[in-house]
Image (tube, grey):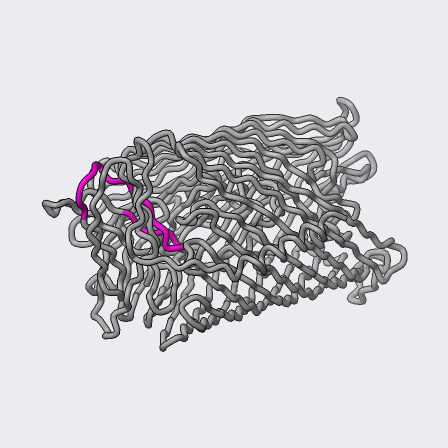
Amino acid sequence: MMFPRILLACCLLLSCVCSYDIAHGQSVSKTTLPNHKGQVTGRVVDSAKGDALEATVIVTNKSGSQVATATAKKDGNFSLVLPGYGEYTFTILYVGYSKHTQLVSWKRGEVAELGVIQLNGQPEELNEVVVKSKKPLIQSKPDKVVYNASADISNAAGSAADVLAKAPMITVDAEGAVKMRGNANIKVLLNGLPSGMFARNLSEALKMIPANTIESIEVITSPSAKYEAEGAGGVINIITKKLRGSNGNLNLNLGNLEQSGNGAINITRGKWDISLSGQANNRKRHRITDLIRQTVDGDNVTGSLHQVSDLDRHNRSASGDFTTTYTIDSSQKLSANASLWKGSWPVIANQYTSYTDAQTNSQYNQVSDQKEQDRWWEFSLNYKKTFARAGQELEVAGSHSDWKNSASYINNQYDMTGKNYFREQSPNNGTGHNWRIQADYTHPLTKSGKSKLETGFRADRTKDFNEYSVRNNRDNPGSDVLQEDSSRGNSLHYYQNVVAGYVSMVVEAKGGWTIRPGIRYERTRLGGDFTNNTQPGFASEFENWVPNLLIAKKLNERHDVKFNYNERINRPDIWDLNPYVNASDPRNINYGNPALRPELTRTLEAGHSYKAGGAFSITSSVYYSFNSNAVESLTTVDSAGVSYTTSQNVASNKRLGVNVSSSFRITRNWNVNTGGDYYHVWYASKALAVKNDGNFYSVNLNSSYTLPRNYTLQLSGNYNNGYVTLQGRGSAYLNYGFSARKEVLNKKAGITLRVNNIFQKTLNQWSYTRFSNFNSSTYNMFYNRSFTVTFNWQFGAYRKVEEGGGEGAGGSRS
């Protein structure tokens, strides 16, 4: 097999180059290039620890006038272009560090590399220092679009799901389902790493992350080979705020649908950094659903179902996070993290059901008491070594996570006189474990570190155990004695092992060209065994070579273009494969499919971005994606009028789309950000003789205005015309809100009022589903009008407020 040889080669390369260390001084290195403008590059680090600093770079001319600014990226690198040639003063600023000033003399045809700039920390405790450096809400980069959530005052309250709904190319529906360019098969990372909390229930896990703890959202449409190949639609990276120095924050939210609180504290003592954070929240949701389904035989209606349900859900969760980092020396650090998360989602559903056909005319009321609880914890270690050469680093990480979940329902059915004649209960309990280890090495190919080689490997092992049973009084209606239905109970032992390796290269060539080819290999083994021999076990093994290519060209200081090709896979997990039958609604049954196979999606994309200083920018892209073995949700109805929904590899799908995002600075105090997405999707299943296609579009708007006396007003909203599926489509979705914020206590604290959907009591949506022998329509009313008052307080020696900056600007730090 070729992969062991490739992995061995990667390891040999890693061991050889780790010892290659080139020291850089503070002098200016000049390279002569023909007809090159005044381009300046450099990297800012902590002189003691070697940590990269997202410092502010200010350039002034001989007269003292400011001519250019930039903010260093997370790796400390910065790049800017001067308006002309001559003598300039460079001033490097970062809160808690001494100012660095450097005089540079420029001549035509030279490119300056300032090298590694070391800032000295100020030993004395300072009073509150506020550095203002405004950054745009939306930033475009060759492989991704970044939504700087910390710059949006409406994110003072809510959850990660609310933040994602405001990010470009992402939509979140009323139930919390997240899609990227219309594709729900996405990979969500937390601070660049996979998290076990997203594996069980993504929509609920996102609601447990407070919005005000999020720094930014990276929407990665063309991931490099360094990223896992999982996620056919792309990658979403949620970056949380990091505390630096000795400081902390406290946030309290009070609203009609949500009450929550969270806080964090960080302590720095010598070479140690210790961070502790925690959150607790309570959310409630109310929904009324009206379902009408007809079973048909040609033009004849053979059965009719009508259901009206009233559902109340309460989401409660709490979590804690502890991180400690030890700086071994200026080039090495070791971090350990422990996280605990616990959540529960009790649901009470009252439902009226009426079904008629040639033999049946039944009516009943049902009360369903559904409970779900999850507990998850994770421990991780991370070692990182940086080298004197810009961009050269080695990172090794490992983690172990453990989870326990329980889901159950108790159904009581009553006839129209109120007599209880049927009862069923079904407990479903599971436990799971995951072990992961990975190593990543980056080797610079040029002195600046912009051209580089990346390589690494990853091993991942997951085990799950799930046990479920069903008890009812079907054989003795009205009895309090419930008998087990052995045909619907079982235990599943599931495993999934993934081994991966990758090689990726970034080449920055003359003329503004950037080329990033890469390839990733992933080998997956998964399977499951049942204790009940009536259900056969399953196992599969598959390999994927996943290539990607990004080509970007900087045409001039305002225009950039790009082209990329990538392949992504989507592996079914235990919840897709488990054949457990959920009959909490006996007329609408759901179950898993152990015969599912992974799907492969290929995407071609071309994009363009335009920047006119800080006043206006626009980013657009056109893409085409296609998939021949897509996993789609399929609903069928039997002769008794009961629907069965599961996932199957039954269709191909194709998408041709375009997305645009723009930012306007109308006045100094008024900023507007807007965006739109459009695609046409085609579904086709030869096996089922089913086809469907349609258009989808969405628009979003975010407008903020800064008033005197530390007041800020904001309006935001998003709208889409409804998703298209293999068997139908949904109706339009509209969500909007108004926010007002007042900063108090010398800008150490703030009070934010947020009102959502004030002009509509409910969000009303319909959808339809059809097949050869049935058609159905569902009407939902979501009670989502809400208001929230938020108080946030930041305390400690330092506070950094981002108000501006160029590409790669960091987010606000407390």
Q: Would residue 344 be found to the left or right of residue 525 on screen?
A: left
Using the rendered image of the protein, determine whether residue 288 is visible from the camera's viewpoint: no
Which residue lies at the image location 80% right of the left edge and 40% below the top edge? 640
Q: Is residue 518 above or below residue 787?
A: above
Q: Residue 273, located in which quarter of the rendered image?
A: bottom left
**Nearer to the camera, 88 or 542:** 88
Using the rendered image of the protein, determine whether residue 777 is visible from the camera's viewpoint: yes
Q: Quadrant of the C terminus?
A: bottom left
Magenta residue span: 70-88
Residue 12 location in percent, x, y? 63, 57
Q: Is residue 674 above or below residue 154?
A: above
- Farthest-out residue, front: 32
- Farthest-out residue, right: 533
- Farthest-out residue, bottom: 269
Which residue lies at the image location 52% right of the left edge and 28% below the top edge? 657
**Nearer to the camera, 24 or 89:** 24
Q: Residue 215, located in which quarter of the rendered image?
A: bottom left
Q: Would residue 669 be found to the left or right of residue 693 on screen?
A: left
- Farthest-out residue, left: 63
* Residue 669 included in the magenta stretch of the image: no
Q: Residue 26, located in which quarter of the rendered image?
A: bottom left
**Nearer to the camera, 411 or 800:** 800
Which residue lies at the image location 26% right of the left edge and 51% below the top edge? 57
Residue 292 location in percent, x, y? 65, 36
* Residue 85 included in the magenta stretch of the image: yes
Q: Would residue 39 be found to the left or right of residue 540 on screen?
A: left
Residue 426 location in percent, x, y? 74, 61
Q: Is residue 791 above or below residue 202?
A: below
Number of residue marks = 0
Residue 641 location in percent, x, y? 77, 39
Which residue lies at the image location 65% right of the left edge and 64% below the top edge? 435
